[in-house]
Image: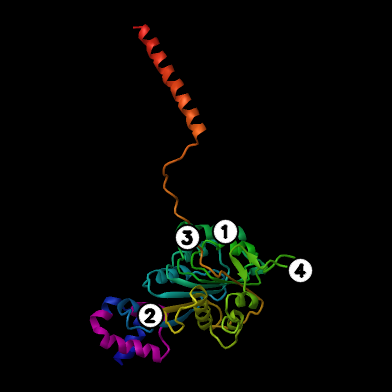
Amino acid sequence: MALRSCAWNAELFVPETLVWASWHYASQIYRHLLNTDSLTFNGWNVFVDAYPAEINPQQQFHVYPSKTDSYEPTQLPSIVNRLAKLDVGLVSFLCIRDFCLTFDDFKELINIPTLGALVLEQSRRHGLSEFHSRRFHDWGRAVQERNALQKLSLLVMCDFGIGRKAILEGVASFPALTLVGLQNSKTWSMSDAPQHTYGDWELLTESGLEKRGLKLQEFNTQQIWGSSYHTNYSKARKLYHLTKTFAHPSRDKSEEDRSVCITYGGWADRIITYEATSWFIRYSQREAPEDLEMPGVVVVPQDRAESANKRRKVRSRKNMDIGALLGAFR
């Protein structure tokens, strides 16, 4: 009875209480929550603050909207605030679905230093999106100015109605971003031959992979994204690990990351099965700006040096003449 009572009120605990009780007792509450599928994101935050090394290395949660008839993500600031306080050694995946996101919502995302994968599904009321390309560029500039989202390597945007060129240019300065998926976002202009490259970004194709010694069977992003048997967490995690392999081919594939995935919105973890998704990849990490060279000895051409000396002599002679002239007034 005491165990069930503690589990029922787990969200009311504070980390200091669990530490005082010791892991021997806290672990029993934690395992009870796991076994009964009762562990919520809020409860998990309490346990991970108290015993970060003892909690499962991978965890996923679904946060449902507080109002089913609202398109405003009212709980997003609270979710961001909790993710922002996580240990920097943990990677967070965030999927936001079926909301009408605004520029203010995008600004909230800048405050998550652990964000490794971001999936955004826009709800377009009356067929229109309130988020436009100019605002997206403003967001990208804000990320760059604050040196934010240093871990973000995967971005998927659905139904925003923003051209691929605007999106890829807007995220060009994100240092770790490797893979971008665009679905129904004006994936090409009104042309029969859409562009396949935008700056450092290149449309992910089998031929492009083969040029770099990679096989489509191992890096088939669309197969992962369009599968009907993978949850949102599984898709985000698989694609995130692909980006690490793209960036570091020699990376140990068995390496496990401590991660947490939050799906906010949507209907009961409804599976995303979009097929018309364009994937763009940046094979090389964005290079850091070169250090400015310190000024050294400037070699002046001889003719210019002689000319400068002549002018200097003239100025010196004039100074002497003026000095003599001033002396005449004494």
Mark 2 packing: few (<14 Cα in 10 Å), some, or many (20+)?
some
Secondary structure state at the residue bearing disc 3 = loop
Secondary structure state at the residue bearing disc 4 = loop
Which numbered dot is residue 192? 4
Which residue bears the numbered disc 1?
137
**Residue positioned 65% across, 80% down in the render:** 275
Measured in 3D between alpha carbons, the distance from the residue under mark 4 to the one under mark 1, in whole angstroms, is 26 Å
Which residue bears the numbered disc 3?
288
Frontmost residue, 55 versus 254: 254
Tags 2 and 4 in contact by the CB under 8 Å rule?
no
Quarter of the picture containing the N terminus is bottom left
| Circle 1 or circle 2, nearest the eye | 1
Residue 282 makes an appearance in the image: yes
Please tell me which of labels 2 and 3 falls first in the chain: 2
Which numbered dot is residue 44? 2
Identify the magenta region.
Answer: 18-47
Which numbered dot is residue 10? none
**Residue positioned 60% across, 64% down in the render:** 167
Frontmost residue, 188 versus 299: 299
Quarter of the picture containing the C terminus is top left
Please tell me which of labels 1 and 2 falls first in the chain: 2
Give how far across and how far down residue 44 sits, in percent: 38, 80
Give how far across and how far down residue 227 sits, in percent: 60, 85
Measured in 3D between alpha carbons, the distance from the residue under mark 1 to the one under mark 2, in whole angstroms, is 35 Å
Q: Amino acid at mark 2?
A: Trp
Secondary structure state at the residue bearing disc 2 = helix
